[in-house]
Amino acid sequence: MVGGGLLGMTVAHTLAKQGRRVTLLESGSHLGGLADAWSIGDITWDRHYHVTLLSDSATREILAELGLDNSMQWRKTQTGFYSKGKLHPFSNALDFARFPVLNPVEKVRLGLTILRASRLQDWRSIESLTVEEWLTQLSGKGVFNKIWRPLLRAKLGEDYKTTSATFIWATIQRLYAARRSGLKEEMFGYLPGGYGAMLQKFECALKKAGVECLCGVKVDAIHASDSGWQADGMEFSRVIVTLPAPLVPSLCPGLPDSEKQDLAGVRYLGIICGSVLLEKPLTPYYVTNILDESIPFTGLIEMSALVDPDQIGKHGLLYIPRYLSPDHADFSRSDEELESEMITALKRMHPALEHNKILAVRISRARHVFPRPTPGYSRHVPRIDSALPGLSILNSAHILNGTLNVNETVSLAQREALRIHALAS
């Protein structure tokens, strides 16, 4: 296994349980990838924001196997919108009725759009439409310009114009999964200690299952050998690469040109994410959606609106994400520049926030986070089983009808690991 993120860990674990001997190679100093934890101020929590839904069955099965599902804490969360210098609650029917951004007709159209999207099962029927085409058909231009366009630009930049309608469909489907699974309502959950607590248990489970975990091993190239495959001077009968699709062609030079083109053609977005530790929580909203396009980030995720205050020292913990193309110039800016821009905009949104109440800020960068589905994407998705026998490539580009999240990642990893095991038997 090349790549020790959550996907690689889950594939390795699933294969080991089937009796396979697995070696997991990770270039970083520890396993976990984008799900890992770090310290900010006097607390340790996730480096990027994650949440588990009550309906996330694949994630919860892993948690149960690790003895952690009963430790999960479940909450109802609140949502807000920021528009024209003001925060508006958007968590229930009364908030929706009072929401000043839309007129009554537009509110009806927005509600019907979400209802229709939640009931649509055949995602391929809208895959060739852009998200703008589909949402304008359902919601009308008024709702699109006031709500959808600002949200899409905040998430995707101008790339929203070439993004498939399945992008927003999958987001709505995830939030309505609870109702389809028979639950009365969706609940958001967190694990005490964050995902870092799960990763520690998961690594122990891997080693107990016989997986050899080698961190600090950067594989420069994978070549066919007499006994199968060679990676970093080691011989393997099979190799599974879980790195982002655009990084694979240079790692696997023996791939056919057509496969290299498919891999290089997947359009990823990266993230610059600020973690901000505040003296006390800022708002009651777990998510604040931003309609003001002058604010230079995607939204605000306030973890302290979800987790027990004792988990984070009774502080406020805020994530400020911004999604960008991997070659965006901002990835080369200094932490100090990015921090200054984020805090300036945060104070514009919350003028009462005093600078001495900001205890710590850390900036995380990742150039390849999630593939952006383009119209007709499923017809061009890279193949998992390469033309080279014994070489498989599995990553988030293979999530066709969902959003990138832990549950989709775990589900994909388990399903494909079992299929690859059967194929190799």
Image (spheres, rainbow, N blue to C red):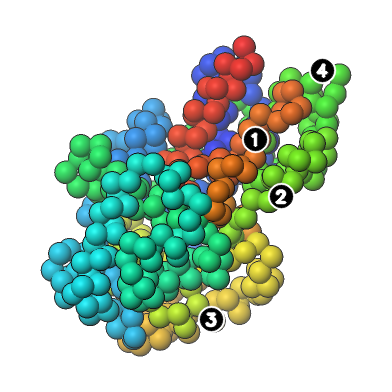
Name which residue type carries label 2. Ala
Secondary structure under tag 3 reads: helix
- Which residue occupies 61% across, 36% down? 394
The secondary element bearing badge 2 is classed as helix
- The quadrant of the image that shows the C terminus is top right
**Residue drawn at 55 percent across, 34 percent down:** 9
Task: Answer with mark 2 or mark 4, whichever residue precedes in sequence.
Answer: 4
- Percent position of residue 107, x then y: 22, 70
Q: Is residue 180 above or below residue 128?
A: above
Residue 31: tell me if it is visible: no
Amino acid bearing label 3? Glu
N-term-proximal mark, 2 vs 3: 2
Q: Residues within 10 Å of mark 2 (few under 14, many from 20)?
A: some
> Label 2 to label 3, Cα distance in Å?
32 Å
Instruction: Give the label, 4 or 1, closer to the camera.
Output: 1
User: Image point 79% across, 25% down: which residue?
Assistant: 229
The residue carrying mark 2 is 264
Tag 1: residue type?
Arg
Which residue carries the number 4 mark?
227
Q: Do tag 4 and tag 1 residues touch (Cβ < 8 Å)? A: no
Q: State the residue position of label 1.
A: 383
